[in-house]
């Protein structure tokens, strides 16, 4: 046995991860259900490092040094269970199985528990960065036992992306499903970021009157400032791209129906269960879903909307600057919501997640990588108990400075009939958090009226009920 790490499942992600390990000097055992893929990998990329190909599960396990470390990179769901069932009987106590697929964290909790009973460490590892990241440095979010990370950590850190200060974008997130949980929230935040960027583009185009090429330039400029991020960078690339067949802007020839693979939806479903408002992510998931309902859109096409004068060139430039402020402030809100979700789950499941460390490992490799994340890391370094990013002094100041422009942009969007669910929901959340009193008091009154659900008072301890259908006197119920 010579291999330090094994990868089973050699589609694009598994192959690239295996090559990444090999390029970093590790001997990598490789295996795939269909052996032809294993052979093809070694034939095409064998010169990149030390690969040990195996045709059977038994040979594969025998080629690994102990404790054995096996990364599963197969289709999430039943295939993962099938592979675990195949390998678990071949392993010894102390060996580590890593699931690098996009598993739901509840599945990871179940699998971890089953394997723990057999003395095998199960690590659910979120891996972000797509194919490119897997090959050149992903952001890795491993869950599982702290003990498993001792032998696994250095291997993962060697192939992970490195942040600007050289820190590897991999850290032990917490027990059982913690890694896959934070990967899910990462994807949810990615949905929100993409939606906010799409709204900014829509406003620049339909209100500002700018052509896609000019908007690409605006995004390029934004990318040189506080919005500096991978998603803003690729937005400029996509907007500048011309369709070869027609010569038209690429964005104008692509069908406007956004698809989704499901991690955004999982994030929102889980947030509802945890009772954490992630309105930015929810609006992003719903916006994709609205775009895909062709029949509804066709039925409503032609409903009246407002008419408005086009902006002058100077007004359009000023408007673009305000859109940058609105985008930044909305982004702060959606990250604040995402972090609240991680904090809540950490408390609920006893994961003890280091909130600042999540920002640190998302600075490189992953889709939401951004200069901004270093600010979040710093915010939690200043106050590890920070209840919301909006309460961090620097973020609070920036959002405070942006708020006039933010309101103006949302108001303009409403007046001109441009849908901005992300910007609007973020602003509503900001206003709700900072409000001294919320109309929830009225909601409580209604609930007590029709369902005797009781309410608490601002001036006395206890629960109260008003006899709404009687003399409307109040009784204390607890
Ligand atoms: P796929 O998700 O397309 O899965 C293909 C692999 O699964 C092949 O190796 C296939 O073997 C194997 N497999 C299947 Br399908 N059923 C199996 C079974 N019952 N037993 C054993 N092997 C089985 O590959 P991928 O796109 O490389 O993604 C791998 C994982 O990484 C997924 O969980 C995905 O969600 C996750 N992920 C993907 C990305 C991305 O950008 N693509 C990013 C991050 C995470 P075969 O060759 O014999 O058919």
Image (cartoon, grey):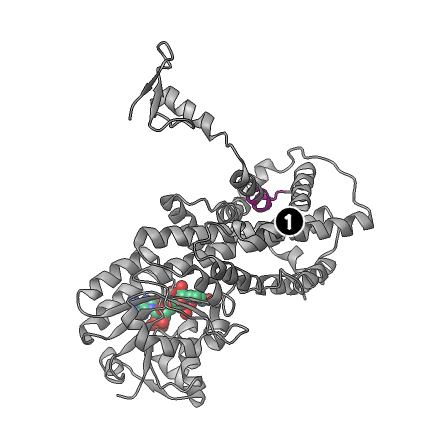
Disc 1 secondary structure class? helix
- Viewer-proximal residue among 106 and 388: 388
Ligand 1, seen in the image, is in the quarter at bottom left
Q: Main secondary structure of the magenta part?
A: helix
Q: Is residue 321 above or below residue 152?
A: above
* Image point (68%, 35%), residue name: 305
Q: Is residue 427 left or right of residue 124?
A: right
Residue 238 is situated, as x and y percent measured from the top left of the image, at 64, 63
Specify the quadrant of the image occupied by residue 119: bottom left
Residue bearing the label numbered 1: 326
How crowded is the residue under tag 1: few (<14 C-alpha within 10 Å), some, or many (20+)? Answer: many
Residue toward you, 224 or 136: 224
Q: Could you say where residue 99 lies in the image, as x and y percent from the top left? A: 33, 68
Between 50 and 95, the one lying in front of the other is 95
Q: Is residue 31 visible?
A: no
Residue 347, x across and y down, in percent: 34, 52
Front residue (pair 47, 456): 456
The yes-or-no answer for disc 1 within 8 Å of ligand 1 is: no
Q: Where residue 259 appears, x then y in whole percent?
A: 50, 54
Quarter that holds the C terminus: top left
Q: Tell me if residue 270 can be seen.
A: yes
Can you say whether 20 is above or below 355 in the image? Answer: below
Magenta extent: 419-426
Residue most extreme to the bottom: 47
Quarter residue 152 falls in: bottom left
Q: Is residue 387 left or right of residue 52?
A: right
Q: Residue at x 42, y 23 (%)?
A: 445
Residue 245 appears in which quarter of the rendering?
bottom right
């Amino acid at each position: 046995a010579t291999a330090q790490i094994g990868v089973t499942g050699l589609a694009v992600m598994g192959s690239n991860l295996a090559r990444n390990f090999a390029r970093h000097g590790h001997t990598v055992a490789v295996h795939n259900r269909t052996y032809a893929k294993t052979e093809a990998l070694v034939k095409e990329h064998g010169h990149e490092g030390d690969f040990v190909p195996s045709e059977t599960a038994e040979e594969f396990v025998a080629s690994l040094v102990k404790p054995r470390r096996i990364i599963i990179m197969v289709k999430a769901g039943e295939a993962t269970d099938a592979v675990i069932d195949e390998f678990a009987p071949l392993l010894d106590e102390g060996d580590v199985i890593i699931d690098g697929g996009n598993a739901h964290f509840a599945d990871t909790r179940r699998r971890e528990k089953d394997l723990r009973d057999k003395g095998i460490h199960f690590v659910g590892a979120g891996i972000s960065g797509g194919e490119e990241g897997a090959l050149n440095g992903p952001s890795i979010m491993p869950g599982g036992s702290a003990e498993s990370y001792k032998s696994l950590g250095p291997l993962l850190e060697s192939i992970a992306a490195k942040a600007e200060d050289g820190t590897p974008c991999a850290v032990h997130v917490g027990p059982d499903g913690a890694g896959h949980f934070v990967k899910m929230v990462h994807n949810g935040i990615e949905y929100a970021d993409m939606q906010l960027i799409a709204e900014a583009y829509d406003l620049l185009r339909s209100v500002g009157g700018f052509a896609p090429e000019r908007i690409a330039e605006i995004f390029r400029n934004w990318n040189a400032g506080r919005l500096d991020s991978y998603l803003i960078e690729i937005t400029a690339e996509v907007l500048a791209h011309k369709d070869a067949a027609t010569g038209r802007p690429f964005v104008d020839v692509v069908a406007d129906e956004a698809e989704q693979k499901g991690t955004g939806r999982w994030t929102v479903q889980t947030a509802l269960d945890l009772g954490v408002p992630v309105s930015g992510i929810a609006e992003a998931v719903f916006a994709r879903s609205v775009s895909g309902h062709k029949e509804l859109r066709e039925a409503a096409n032609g409903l009246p909307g407002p008419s408005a004068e086009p902006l002058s060139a100077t007004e359009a430039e000023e408007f673009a600057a305000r859109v940058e402020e609105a985008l930044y402030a909305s982004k702060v809100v959606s990250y604040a919501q995402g972090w609240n979700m991680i904090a809540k789950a950490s408390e609920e499941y006893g994961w003890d997640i280091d909130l600042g460390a999540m920002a640190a490992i998302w600075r490189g490799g992953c889709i939401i990588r951004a200069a901004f994340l270093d600010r979040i890391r710093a915010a939690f370094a200043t106050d590890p108990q920070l209840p919301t990013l909006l309460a961090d002094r620097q973020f609070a100041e920036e959002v405070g400075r942006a708020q006039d422009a933010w309101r103006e942009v949302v108001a303009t969007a409403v007046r001109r009939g441009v849908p901005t669910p992300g910007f609007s929901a973020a602003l509503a959340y900001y206003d709700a958090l900072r409000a001294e009193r919320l109309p929830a008091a009225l909601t409580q009154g209604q609930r007590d009226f029709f369902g005797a659900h009781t309410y608490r008072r601002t001036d006395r301890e206890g629960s109260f009920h008003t006899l709404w259908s009687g003399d409307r006197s109040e009784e204390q119920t607890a």
